[in-house]
Image (cartoon, rainbow, N blue to C red):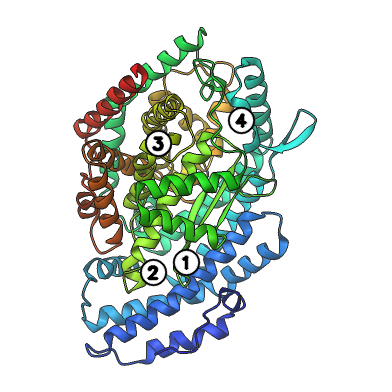
């Protein structure tokens, strides 16, 4: 047994490869038998948890302050000196287990994933993967430094979000244009970064012997239950089943606002002229509200959340030099998740908290699985955990039910959420279709102007209903502002697939809320020991791509919106 591994994260962060390597060598040198297999796997897990947590904590430090030179240097040092060596050592252990012919209980799918990882492994790619991480950090730096002058002060792009809710259309337009102008100033920088990303990714695929980067990335993401062709089917299903509904929602909004055409700065404001929903005044209030809601959903989920609050595992406020967006990561050694977001006081921030907490609950639920390899879950279901929680928490937004709103405002929040979910599918299809084009046509995609043109083509295919006339430069550079395209290619269809799964969980909750929550938690606890179709089934859903299934649940969402509006 490995007995000298650090137990304290602070000690962990001071590890060097010379501290880590002997433990990997010990595991690689041991004879592996049926008798000692569980102990060997437990030691591998303990070591892997520590290396993974070290990576997560160093990465978090670069996102909470993108201007922290020391954090930047420490993470880059990890990427240069530990990450590639640890990947090589992990590969040695994977090969050792596969060569043994042993099949530990609950390891059918982990072994299948290991075989895919082993097939893809290429030592020549290790420095390239390190370089890819560094380019992703450069993207965060560019976007994290974007600020505008507004009402006499300097604020981040995210801090303009409340202005988009203003009933004064001229003010909304001024804010929207200010944000776009600042983002367009970085057009050349992001294009230059893109022209580094693309050849690097092509080289990764070539080194691994894959026909193109899409095939490489599919295997790297361990997408074992569906193919690129399924994604094309899903795009077509969205075009058929969702785009007409989205156009109806946009037209309803246009009429409610009383404008001749709907413009991009008209999409966030309340169409009936009501003041923006304000669920909290500061992040402490946000924490208390979220805790109350989760305790009403399920007492154990509420306790999971409170554990995070007590352990200061939440970084919620927006500030300059903070990376954009929101995420939940895990600290495997500590058996704890960490939530990062940029809250500015909007209802969307509460939704983000519900979403990221779903990921956090997934971490807590899988902690009972003994081995790290069993906790590796496909993003297609990982996002069911988050999107499902948004919907399962929806009945508790009203103050009388645990939340903060009046009944009317709670209904309004639910309407907005369901509408945004419907409108998301076409946008997701734009992102997914664009990425398939990029890696099917890498020579064309190396020219950012052709990427601009292709983004416009896909936008016009899926996103009818909003008038972008005179804003062609802003529209065509939309791919610049979708971080997934740059940092985690092909990671976006998961949201669309998972949203369909989450809506099915929500549909079950209409009939039996407690039963739906119980099924949700049981599915989360399976971790990576079940396939995607099996995980969806455990949660009470179907893993699907077809227009019929999608149309059925979009119809239910539209009917629910109508009922909430009538009430």
From the viewer's perspective, is the residue at label 1 or at label 3 nearer?
3
108 or 211: nearer the viewer: 108
From the viewer's perspective, is the residue at label 1 or at label 4 nearer?
4
The kind of secondary structure element at disc 1 is: helix
Residue highlighted by disc 1: 125
Q: Mark 4 vs mark 3: which is more N-terminal?
A: 4
Q: Is residue 146 above or below residue 539?
A: above
Looking at the image, do the residues carrying marks 1 and 2 touch, with CB atoms under 8 Å apart? yes
Q: Residue at x 50, y 51 (%)?
A: 327
Residue sitting farthest toward the right: 152
Q: Mark 3 vs mark 2: which is more N-terminal?
A: 2
Distance from the alpha carbon under mark 3 to that under mark 2: 30 Å
Distance from the alpha carbon under mark 1 to that under mark 4: 44 Å
Residue 162, numbered label: 4
- How many C-alpha atoms fall within 10 Å of the one at disc 1: few (<14), some, or many (≥20)? many
Looking at the image, do the residues carrying marks 4 and 2 touch, with CB atoms under 8 Å apart? no
Residue highlighted by disc 2: 121
Q: In screen coordinates, is 495 left or right of 173?
A: left
From the viewer's perspective, is the residue at label 4 or at label 2 nearer?
4
Q: Quadrant of residue 408?
A: top left
Q: In screen coordinates, is 308 left or right of 182?
A: left
Residue highlighted by disc 3: 428
The kind of secondary structure element at disc 2 is: loop
Q: Position of residue 108 (x, y in %)?
A: 21, 69
Q: Position of residue 419 (x, y in %)?
A: 39, 27
The kind of secondary structure element at disc 3 is: helix
Q: Quadrant of residue 184?
A: top right
């Amino acid at each position: 047994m490995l007995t000298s591994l650090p137990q304290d994260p602070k000690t962990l962060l001071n590890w060097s490869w010379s501290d880590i390597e002997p433990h990997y060598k010990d595991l690689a040198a041991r004879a592996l038998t049926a008798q000692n297999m569980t102990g060997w796997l437990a030691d591998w897990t303990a070591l892997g948890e520590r290396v993974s947590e070290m990576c997560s904590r160093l990465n978090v430090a670069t996102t909470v302050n993108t201007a922290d030179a020391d954090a930047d240097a420490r993470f880059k040092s990890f990427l240069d000196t530990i990450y590639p060596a640890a990947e090589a050592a992990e590969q040695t252990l994977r090969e050792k287990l596969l060569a043994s012919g042993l099949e530990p209980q609950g390891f059918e799918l982990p072994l299948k994933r290991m075989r895919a990882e082993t097939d893809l492994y290429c030592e020549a790619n290790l420095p390239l993967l390190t370089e890819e991480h560094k380019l992703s950090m450069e993207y965060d730096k560019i976007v994290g430094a974007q600020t505008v002058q507004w009402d006499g002060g300097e604020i981040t792009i995210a801090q303009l979000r409340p202005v988009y809710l203003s009933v004064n259309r001229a003010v909304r337009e001024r804010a929207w244009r200010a944000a776009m102008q600042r983002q367009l100033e970085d057009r050349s920088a992001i294009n230059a970064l893109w022209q580094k990303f693309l050849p690097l990714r092509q080289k990764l695929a070539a080194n691994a012997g894959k026909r193109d980067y899409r095939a490489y990335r599919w295997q790297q993401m361990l997408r074992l239950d569906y193919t690129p062709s399924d994604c094309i089917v899903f795009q077509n299903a969205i075009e058929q089943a969702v785009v007409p509904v989205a156009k109806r929602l946009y037209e309803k909004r246009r009429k409610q606002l009383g404008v001749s055409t709907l413009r991009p700065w008209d999409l966030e404001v309340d169409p009936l002229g009501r003041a923006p929903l304000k669920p909290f005044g500061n992040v402490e209030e946000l924490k208390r509200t979220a805790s109350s809601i989760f305790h009403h959903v399920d007492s154990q989920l509420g306790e999971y959340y409170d554990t995070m609050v007590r352990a200061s595992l939440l970084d919620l406020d927006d500030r300059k030099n903070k990376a954009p967006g929101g995420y939940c990561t895990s600290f495997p050694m500590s058996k704890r998740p960490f939530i990062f977001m940029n809250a500015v006081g909007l209802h969307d921030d509460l939704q983000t908290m519900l979403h990221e907490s779903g990921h956090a609950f997934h971490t807590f639920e899988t902690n009972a699985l003994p081995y790290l390899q069993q906790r590796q879950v496909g993003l297609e279901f990982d996002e069911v955990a988050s999107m499902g929680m948004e919907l399962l928490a929806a009945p508790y937004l009203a103050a009388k039910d645990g939340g903060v709103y009046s009944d009317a405002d709670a209904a309004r929040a639910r309407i907005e959420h369901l509408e945004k979910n419907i409108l998301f599918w076409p946008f997701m299809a734009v992102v997914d279709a664009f990425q398939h084009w990029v890696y099917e046509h890498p020579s064309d995609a190396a020219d950012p102007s052709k990427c601009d043109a292709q983004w416009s083509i896909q936008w016009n295919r899926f996103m009818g209903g909003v008038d972008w006339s005179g804003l062609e430069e802003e529209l065509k550079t939309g791919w610049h502002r979708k971080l997934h395209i740059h940092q985690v290619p092909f990671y976006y269809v998961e949201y669309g697939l998972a949203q369909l799964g989450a809506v099915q969980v929500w549909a079950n909750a209409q009939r039996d809320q407690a039963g739906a929550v119980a099924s949700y938690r049981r599915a989360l606890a399976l971790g990576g020991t079940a396939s995607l179709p099996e995980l969806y089934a455990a949660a009470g859903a179907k893993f699907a791509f077809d227009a019929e299934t999608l149309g059925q649940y979009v119809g239910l969402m539209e009917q629910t919106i109508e009922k909430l509006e009538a009430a």
